[in-house]
Image: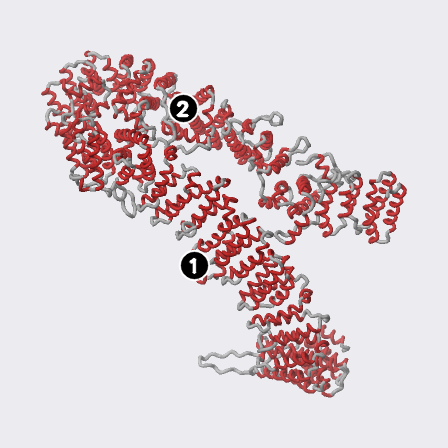
């Protein structure tokens, strides 16, 4: 029905009238509740008058309620009206919420709490105009909100309460809550009464601020704002939304300036942040950056730092380049240090995950510069290149760290994108910074620059040239190096190391200019690391290694390099010379330039490059580019004529002009005494500069040498100043002079030189003249010049004379060397020649063992021997040198023997000379090998000698003979003998001899034809297999047990067992025994072969390598046999064997990666088989081999062989040999890591379950966790735990089985020390229980339990039944404390993880927990008690009730306290963890808890604690369950256990105190029966309490029991029986309790009994003492006086006081029944008893009376007087008179205390009131007391009694 306008107005007027005329506040409140929402709804009326009337009503109501603060408004209805009916009429909602807001203030806490869900619901759908006020209402409601305790039932109820509305509602509210924390307080103007508006806050736009203030109609001061924030925070964390959705809110709150920040920070630590959630990350970025569109400014810097720290862990935050740019720029330009620092971390994070975002420039934003440029600008602004540290810098430490981090971040950015380095601007900037900034930044800047090295290859050709120019400038300018400060020098070194790295990374090895830069870096004054890095660029091997390293850094997918790097190319020789000549020509006048300083190193590199380049063209001459490349190159020319020929041809092909310029520079530098090349050479191994100059001069074309003729004068001048040069340099200058002189000299010039030597040998000119002639004359003769015989003879005589002079002896030797070598002595007449040779032989024989020159010269003298005898003399002299300890000298001797035997057939002479073939042929014909066979026979004979030093020398000499005279006929003929000699030497213990024999075997084998090779091979094999088959081999024979190394070299328990059997086995097992000859030369086990001399013998290794490579390429079957064996032998435990096999491997295998990939399966098969071999060396080597093989294995291969690999790994871990076990342990660590990696990769594959099944079965089996080996178990356990952590859901299927196994094994996996400590706890003064508690605590947080927890989380859904069965089974079968505690913990975790899904299994779990309560270990039982409490929440009340009965029965039947305690803990656990279930069965629990709390000790404490918690109403709870308590106690009063009976009796006694008059008669009777039942039997301690309860109950309900004759008689009989007990102490206590019953029930029999007993008790007390009036005692036998107790000390003794007090109390109780005695005619007996006993208080023999007795007399008299009333009975009067006299007597004693007198006065006052016949006496006595001057207190009492 539609109302008219007037009707609507009339209705409103009536409503208004109701509001105004309401008679009371209740009436007004009722009217408002009914009518006010409807009134406000009329604001939606279309009539203006109606709306106006509504406003009038609102005004009236507002005025009325403003003064009536207690009137409540219909808040809930108003809110509902605003939510539902304000859609088209906002005013309805506005005014409804206005009054709702006021109504909130009038609500109590519970009402506010109940209203919260209504306000939350549909918040998001409210009109925008109403949301501010609704939000404010919600905040006001939350002011009284109290968060529930965590993990409680209250928390669950709170979550249910808040489970309203949609998720959108909550998310909108959470966003508003978050924004509210950005709000800043701004108080409204009180005078204007206007809410401020139009301002923003960090993080809030103007509309956002108005939402909370103006639109909500509220303003905030600091206190008000803080109260709102605290309320919001409490509400959000109490269950408003899941924790994971609170991350943003908590992050914002954690930076609030209130105490809430600390709480929020703690909560934030427990919240999982979704770093890759797109919406979440976008919201954080918006907060950080602000929003221009909405006008929302960024949040405060402190919060920005917090947000940025979260963004730094998100890859999603790096995707939007615009956001990245703004985020980084804002952070970099922030004044907050932490934000700037975090911004740099963020930039590094972006550089790692999306580096492209840093390079893009966003021209639409305020920050259009890329990040790298911004960082550079910041560095400029702070002072550049030198940081400006001054007073404007706030914190030096932070500022320096900030700048360092900027450099670091800049480096991280630059290395991610090659575009940054294309123009080298950043590189130059960083180089300038490195040179100019503070020293503390240099390491960081260097790292930043070095990280750019891999990118330098991408530079354009133009930029590469620019880089070379920069490098040249930095490397060549040595001004700072020699004249700068130490800091400048250090800065220069940092720059140089960076530039060298750039050069090595940017330019290929064949770039000549780059190599020149490397040469410049080797300047001796550079820092060591600069020189080392530069040397790497000049060494192909180290260059390859650095390239490999850079490749790995630039490409994460780059595989392990191994040998998989192509050989480098060398610069073209002519290009290299051109580059060097151009730089050397422009080297300037200053000698400090690096070009001048490093000329010698430049020359060396040119030489090495030249030789390497020509040998690389021929495979058979190829020089391996390994770490020994330098020595190989420098020795190649001395060992190969063909290489010399190739080098000569290469030099001949170089432009004559280039070569001429190059040689000119070299020679000028050599003869310059100030040159840096003439300084002492530090590297003794490197070839000398002068030798290289001579080399290039000797190998240059004749025309080029002729062009250099003009330099002869300079060279001769240098020889004249020979004292300025070293001896070696003087010699090479002399050689150079000879080379240049001999090419174009004539006879006259030669004669002139000879003439110059015709001076006294002591003169200075003789030495330089001798130097000039020493090489010039012999070489001139070889070039065709003729000599004057006489002049030549004189020259030789001068040399002979000079040789006798010690000062110039060495000069003379150098002069004689070329004369003898080139055959010039043949120019002399025979007689002169023989005479000269005789003299020289005699002269040099003395110094034969001095050095190589002397030995070499001796060998050259032998060239002129004319008969066998002289030759024998020369050889014999060399033989005598075998005792020399210098190994190098033995090789020199071997070279000399080859010259003696072969003349110019020896390669030693050929390789040391640079002669043309014609000259060599002529010399060969003159000095042939006619003596080779005889000397060879002698060497073979020496090899059979018994003297060790001679055998060793003979071996080396024989090796040299074969090496240098291998083409001689004698060697071919006697090849088999030589072979046998070398085989014999394999038995020697000296490693040099063995290695020499190896090389000799390889050499002699290759020199023979096929037939001889087969014969040699058979002989070698027989010598290993059957020593007898090899005849004539003494003193030792090679066999499979022949030692390769000297005993003690490898200290093992078994001794040195390394044998050649390894190499022989390798060859034999590979299918080709002849390979042994290839392997032996490759097995470099001595450092000798990497020295300059030993390298000459390594060429056989090259030849062996070539032949073996060809074999492997052509024969796949052999390769499949050889490579796996060789791979395994590389890891032999004996280092020398491993080194030998590695030598073979490195020589044979070009690419380790490719080879292993090709032969992976055979290698794996071999090493797995080897791990089970009998020989421990094979097992250990196989373990390490498998460890290495894993780095090359694919995941698929690993999975395929996983079971076999792990089986063998576990096997070696349990090996008898310790070193094998150690290898196994290392292997399993790597296997574990591989397993985890593979498990992550195969997680999504179909075969993953099968693979995991095999893994888990293996690990859980007897070879894993159930192994007897402790190490195996530990590894298996750790691997499984890591697998569980990493694999996650992939293991879901296996989770129940794993949990079961973990729980069962937990005890056996624990340390045995714990078990010992538990068993022997008493020895260490600790209890076993304390140890168990510690163990239990440790187990609950152990790694195994963490794994179990992870597995439990996987057991949802269909796995739950299996999981429960496994857990129950483990609980039943497990043994040991750790396993049992683990089971209880697992049950706890399972229940907490699946509280609803487990309900069907609650009964089974509860049964398992109940069984656990019977365990023998107390700690285990307590743990099961706790678990039982958690499990109860899964069960039905009916099931719980059943188990309640079992728990009660368990308690009552328990034989000891600990069993009862467990029941109490179980019940407490149920209440704590299953409160709702406890409440449902409380009626069963509460009676028992009440009874049980009357136990003793710990049991009582536990049940009392439970009772205090559960019985909130206390007495009401007891009265509610009174009958149940009585029944329970009654049923167990006959328990066989005394503690139980006592407990029940006490509980019944206690329950009696709760009985009310309204309690049913039946229950009272039942209580009496129970108490009587409890009193049956003998007396026991505490039984008097039951008597007291029985008497109290009877007296309290005497109305009920008075007519119950049976109960009454029963009680009376029981009391009589108790009084008749023999236990006197018990009777004394009971006697005091019975008198109330006597009075209440008028029991004459009981009265008489009590009186009799009382008399007896008092008599016993009085007679039990001793006579206190004792004199001095006699002395005892030891003459010591006994100490007597005086009456004074006796008073204070405890037994005296106890007896006195008891007598007084008993007499008072007897006096209390005086009235009953009068009625029953027993007063006389009672009075007589009271009189005698009362007066007897002062005459007892055992009790010394105190003031207590004095007071008691008056009190007893008062009791009787009051009971007698005004009776005039003479007996009563006499009793009172006697008592009064005694009372007054005691009160007037001098020592009587004040209270005695007061009580006496009170007694007298009572007597006067009763008007006794002797009142006059009483009055006079009191007057007498008054006159005696009493104390004020006594006087006051007298005055009150009427005595004045």
Q: CA distance from mark 2 to mark 1?
A: 69 Å
Q: Quadrant of the N terminus?
A: top right
In this rendering, would 194 be left or right of 500?
right
Mark sitting earlier along the chain (2/1): 2
Residue 1316 is labelled as 1
Q: Quadrant of the C terminus?
A: bottom right
The local crowd at label 1, few if under 14, some if 14 to 19, many if 20 or more residues have their Cα within 10 Å, is few
- Pointer 2 with pointer 1, Cβ within 8 A: no
Query: Do we see residue 498 in this rendering?
Result: yes
Depth check: give the residue in front, 206 or 1034. 1034
* Residue that label 2 marks: 508
**SS for callout 2:** loop
Residue 1196 to residue 768: above or below = below
Residue ID at (66%, 74%) = 1566
Query: Do we see residue 1704 in this rendering?
Result: no
In this rendering, would 1081 be left or right of 1565?
left
Residue 342 to residue 1625: above or below = above
Depth check: give the residue in front, 773 or 1516. 1516
Depth check: give the residue in front, 1664 or 79. 79
* Res 1150 → quadrant: top left
Residue 1688 at what x, y percent from top left? 58, 77
In this rendering, would 1473 be left or right of 1604?
left
Residue 954 at what x, y percent from top left? 18, 34
Residue 1743 at what x, y percent from top left? 60, 80
Residue ID at (45%, 57%) = 1314
Residue 833 at what x, y percent from top left? 12, 21
The local crowd at label 2, few if under 14, some if 14 to 19, many if 20 or more residues have their Cα within 10 Å, is some
Residue ID at (79%, 38%) = 88
Q: Residue furthest bottom?
A: 1770
**SS for callout 1:** helix
């Amino acid at each position: 029905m539609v109302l008219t306008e007037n009707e609507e107005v009339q209705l409103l007027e009536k409503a208004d009238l109701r509001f105004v005329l309401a008679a009371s506040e209740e009436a007004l409140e009722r009217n408002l509740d009914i009518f006010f929402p409807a009134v406000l709804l009329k604001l939606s009326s279309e009539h203006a008058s109606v709306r106006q009337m509504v406003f009038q009503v609102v005004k009236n109501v507002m005025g009325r309620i403003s003064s009536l603060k207690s009137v409540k408004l219909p808040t809930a209805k108003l809110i509902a009206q605003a939510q539902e009916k304000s859609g088209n009429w906002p005013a309805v909602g506005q005014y409804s919420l206005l009054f709702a807001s006021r109504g909130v203030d009038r609500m109590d806490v519970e009402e506010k709490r109940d209203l919260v869900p209504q306000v939350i619901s549909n918040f998001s759908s409210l009109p925008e105009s109403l949301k501010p006020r609704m939000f404010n209402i919600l905040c006001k409601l939350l002011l009284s909100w109290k968060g529930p305790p965590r993990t409680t039932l209250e928390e669950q109820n709170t979550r249910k309460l808040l489970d309203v509305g949609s998720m959108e509602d909550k998310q909108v509210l959470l966003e508003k809550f978050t924004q509210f924390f950005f709000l800043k307080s701004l108080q409204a103007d009180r005078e204007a009464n206007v809410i401020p508006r139009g301002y923003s806050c960090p993080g809030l736009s103007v509309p956002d601020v108005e939402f909370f203030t103006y639109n909500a109609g509220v303003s905030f001061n600091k206190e008000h704002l803080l109260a709102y924030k605290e309320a919001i925070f409490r509400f959000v964390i109490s269950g408003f939304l899941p924790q994971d959705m609170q991350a943003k809110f908590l992050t914002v709150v954690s930076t609030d300036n209130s105490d809430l920040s600390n709480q929020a920070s703690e909560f934030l630590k427990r919240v999982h942040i979704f770093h890759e959630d797109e919406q979440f990350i976008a919201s954080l970025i918006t907060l950080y950056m602000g929003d221009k569109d909405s006008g929302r400014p960024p949040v405060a810097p402190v919060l920005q730092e917090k947000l940025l720290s979260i963004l730094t862990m998100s890859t999603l935050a790096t995707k939007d380049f615009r956001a990245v740019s703004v985020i980084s720029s804002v952070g970099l330009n922030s004044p907050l240090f932490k934000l700037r620092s975090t911004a740099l971390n963020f930039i590094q994070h972006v550089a790692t995950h999306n580096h492209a975002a840093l390079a893009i420039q966003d021209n639409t934003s305020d920050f259009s510069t890329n990040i790298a440029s911004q960082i550079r600008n910041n560095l400029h602004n702070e002072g550049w290149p030198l940081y400006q540290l001054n007073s404007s810098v706030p914190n030096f430490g932070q500022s320096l760290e900030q700048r360092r981090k900027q450099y670091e971040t800049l480096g991280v950015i630059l290395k991610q994108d090659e575009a940054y380095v294309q123009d080298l601007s950043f590189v130059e900037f960083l180089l300038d910074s490195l040179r100019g900034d503070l020293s503390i930044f240099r390491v960081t800047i260097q790292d930043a620059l070095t990280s750019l090295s891999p990118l330098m290859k991408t530079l354009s050709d133009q930029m590469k040239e620019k880089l070379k120019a920069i490098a040249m400038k930095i490397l060549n300018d040595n001004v700072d190096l020699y004249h700068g400060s130490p800091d400048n020098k250090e800065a220069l070194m940092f720059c140089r190391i960076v530039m060298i790295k750039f050069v090595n990374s940017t330019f290929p090895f064949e770039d000549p200019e780059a190599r020149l830069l490397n040469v410049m870096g080797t300047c001796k004054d550079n820092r060591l690391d600069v020189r080392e890095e530069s040397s790497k660029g000049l060494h192909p091997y180290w260059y390859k290694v650095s390239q490999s390293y850079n490749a790995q850094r630039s490409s994460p997918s780059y595989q392990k390099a191994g040998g998989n790097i192509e050989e480098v190319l060398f610069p073209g020789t002519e290009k290299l010379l051109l580059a060097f000549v151009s730089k050397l020509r422009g080297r300037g006048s200053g000698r400090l330039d690096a070009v001048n300083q490093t000329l010698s190193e430049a020359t060396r590199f040119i030489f090495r490059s030249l030789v390497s380049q020509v040998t690389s063209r021929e495979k058979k001459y190829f020089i391996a580019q390994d770490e020994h490349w330098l020595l190989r190159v420098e020795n190649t020319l001395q060992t190969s004529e063909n290489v010399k020929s190739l080098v000569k041809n290469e030099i001949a092909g170089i432009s004559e002009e280039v070569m001429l310029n190059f040689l000119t520079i070299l020679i000028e530098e050599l003869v310059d005494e100030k040159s840096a090349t003439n300084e002492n050479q530090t590297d003794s191994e490197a070839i000398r500069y002068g030798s290289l100059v001579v080399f290039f001069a000797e190998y240059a074309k004749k025309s080029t040498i002729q062009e250099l003729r003009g330099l002869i004068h300079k060279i001769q001048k240098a020889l004249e100043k020979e004292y300025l040069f070293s001896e070696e340099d003087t010699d090479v200058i002399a050689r150079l002079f000879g080379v240049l002189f001999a090419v174009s000299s004539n006879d006259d010039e030669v004669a002139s030189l000879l003439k110059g030597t015709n001076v006294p040998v002591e003169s200075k000119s003789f030495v330089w003249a001798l130097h000039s002639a020493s090489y010039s004359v012999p070489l001139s003769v070889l070039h065709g010049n003729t000599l004057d015989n006489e002049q030549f003879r004189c020259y030789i005589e001068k040399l002979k004379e000079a040789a006798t002079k010690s000062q110039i002896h060495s000069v003379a030797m150098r002069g004689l060397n070329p004369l003898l070598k080139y055959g010039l002595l043949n120019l002399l007449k025979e007689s002169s020649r023989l005479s000269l040779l005789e003299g020289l032989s005699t002269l040099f024989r003395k110094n034969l063992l001095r050095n190589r020159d002397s030995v070499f010269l001796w060998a050259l003298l032998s060239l002129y021997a004319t008969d066998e005898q002289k030759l024998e003399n020369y050889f014999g002299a060399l033989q005598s040198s075998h005792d020399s300890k210098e190994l190098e000298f033995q090789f020199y001797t071997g070279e000399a023997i080859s010259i003696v035997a072969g003349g110019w057939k020896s390669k030693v002479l050929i390789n040391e000379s640079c002669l043309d073939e014609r000259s060599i042929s002529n010399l060969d014909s003159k000095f042939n090998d006619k003596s080779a066979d005889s000397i060879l026979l002698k060497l073979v004979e020496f090899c059979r000698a018994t003297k060790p030093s001679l055998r060793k020398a003979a071996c080396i000499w024989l090796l040299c003979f074969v090496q240098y005279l291998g083409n001689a006929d004698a060697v071919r003929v006697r090849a088999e003998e030589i072979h046998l000699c070398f085989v014999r030497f394999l038995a020697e213990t000296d490693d040099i001899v063995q290695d020499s024999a190896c090389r000799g075997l390889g050499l002699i084998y290759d020199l023979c034809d096929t037939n001889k090779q087969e014969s040699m091979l058979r002989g070698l094999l027989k010598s290993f297999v059957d020593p007898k088959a090899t005849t004539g081999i003494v003193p030792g024979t090679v066999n499979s047990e022949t030692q390769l190394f000297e005993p003690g070299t490898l200290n093992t328990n078994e001794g040195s067992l390394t044998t050649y059997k390894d190499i022989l086995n390798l060859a034999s097992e590979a299918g080709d025994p002849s390979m042994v000859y290839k392997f032996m030369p490759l097995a470099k086990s001595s450092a000798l072969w990497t020295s300059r001399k030993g390298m000459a013998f390594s060429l056989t290794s090259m030849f062996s390598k070539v032949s073996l490579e060809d074999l492997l390429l052509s024969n796949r079957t052999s390769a499949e046999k050889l490579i796996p064996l060789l791979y395994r032998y590389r890891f032999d435990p004996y280092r020398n064997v491993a080194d030998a096999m590695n030598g073979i491997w490195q020589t044979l295998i070009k690419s380790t990666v490719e080879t292993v990939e090709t032969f992976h399966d055979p290698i794996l098969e071999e090493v797995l088989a080897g791990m089970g071999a009998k020989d421990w060396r094979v097992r250990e080597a196989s373990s390490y081999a498998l460890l290495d093989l894993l780095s090359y294995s694919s995941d698929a291969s690993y999975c395929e062989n996983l079971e076999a690999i792990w089986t063998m790994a576990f096997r070696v871990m349990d090996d008898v040999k310790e070193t094998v076990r150690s290898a196994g342990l290392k292997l399993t660590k790597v296997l574990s890591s591989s397993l985890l990696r593979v498990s992550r990769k195969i997680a999504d594959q179909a075969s993953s379950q099968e693979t995991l099944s095999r893994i888990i079965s293996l690990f859980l089996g007897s070879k894993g966790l159930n192994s007897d080996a402790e190490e195996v178990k530990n590894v298996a356990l750790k691997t499984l735990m890591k697998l569980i952590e990493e694999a996650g859901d992939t293991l879901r299927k296996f989770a129940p089985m794993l949990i079961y196994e973990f729980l069962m094994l937990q005890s056996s996996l624990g340390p045995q020390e714990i078990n010992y400590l538990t068993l022997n706890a008493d020895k260490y003064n600790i209890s076993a229980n304390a140890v168990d508690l510690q163990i239990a605590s440790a187990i609950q947080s152990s790694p195994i339990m963490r794994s179990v927890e992870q597995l439990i989380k996987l057991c949802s859904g269909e796995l739950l039944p299996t999981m429960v069965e496994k857990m129950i089974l483990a609980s039943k079968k497990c043994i040991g404390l750790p396993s049992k505690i683990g089971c209880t913990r697992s049950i706890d975790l399972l229940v907490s993880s699946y509280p609803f899904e487990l309900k069907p299994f609650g009964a089974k779990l509860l049964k398992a927990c109940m069984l656990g309560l019977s365990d023998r270990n107390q700690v285990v039982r307590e743990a099961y008690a706790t678990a039982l409490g958690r499990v109860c929440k899964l069960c039905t009340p009916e099931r719980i009730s059943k188990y309640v009965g079992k728990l009660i029965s368990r308690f009552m039947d328990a034989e000891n306290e600990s069993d009862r305690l467990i029941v109490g803990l179980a019940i407490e656990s149920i209440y704590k963890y299953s409160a709702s279930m406890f409440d449902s069965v409380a009626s069963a629990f509460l009676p028992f808890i009440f009874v049980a709390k009357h136990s003793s000790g710990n049991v009582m404490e536990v049940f009392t604690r439970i009772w205090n918690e559960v019985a909130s109403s206390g007495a009401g709870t007891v009265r509610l369950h009174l009958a149940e308590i009585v029944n329970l106690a009654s049923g167990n009063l006959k328990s066989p256990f005394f503690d139980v009976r006592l407990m029940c009796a006490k509980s019944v006694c206690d329950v009696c105190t709760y009985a009310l008059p309204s309690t049913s008669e039946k229950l009272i009777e039942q209580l009496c029966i129970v108490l009587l039942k409890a009193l049956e039997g003998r007396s026991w301690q505490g039984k008097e309490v039951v008597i007291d309860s029985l008497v109290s109950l009877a007296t309290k309900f005497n109305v009920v029991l008075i007519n119950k004759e049976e109960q009454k008689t029963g009680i009376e009989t029981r009391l009589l029986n108790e009084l008749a007990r023999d236990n006197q102490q018990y009777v004394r206590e009971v006697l005091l309790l019975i008198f109330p019953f006597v009075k209440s029930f008028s029991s004459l029999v009981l009265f008489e009994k009590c009186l009799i007993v009382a008399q007896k008790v008092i008599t016993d007390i009085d007679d039990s003492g001793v006579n206190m009036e004792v004199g001095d005692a006699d002395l005892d036998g030891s003459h010591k006086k006994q100490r007597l107790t005086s009456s004074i000390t006796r008073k204070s003794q405890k037994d005296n006081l106890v007896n006195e007090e008891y007598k007084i109390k008993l007499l008072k109780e007897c006096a209390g029944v005086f009235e009953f005695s009068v009625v029953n005619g027993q007063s006389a007996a009672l009075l007589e008893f009271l009189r005698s006993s009362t007066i007897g208080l002062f005459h007892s023999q055992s009790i010394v009376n105190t003031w207590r007795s004095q007071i008691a007399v008056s009190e007893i008299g008062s009791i009787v007087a009051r009971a007698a009333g005004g009776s005039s009975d003479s007996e009563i009067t006499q009793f009172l008179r006697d008592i009064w006299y005694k009372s007054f007597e005691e009160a007037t004693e001098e020592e009587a205390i004040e209270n005695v007198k007061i009580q006496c006065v009170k007694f007298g006052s009572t007597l006067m009131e009763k008007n006794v016949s002797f009142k006059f006496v009483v009055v006079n006595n009191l007057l007498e007391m008054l006159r005696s001057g009493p104390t004020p207190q006594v006087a006051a009492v007298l005055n009150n009694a009427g005595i004045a």
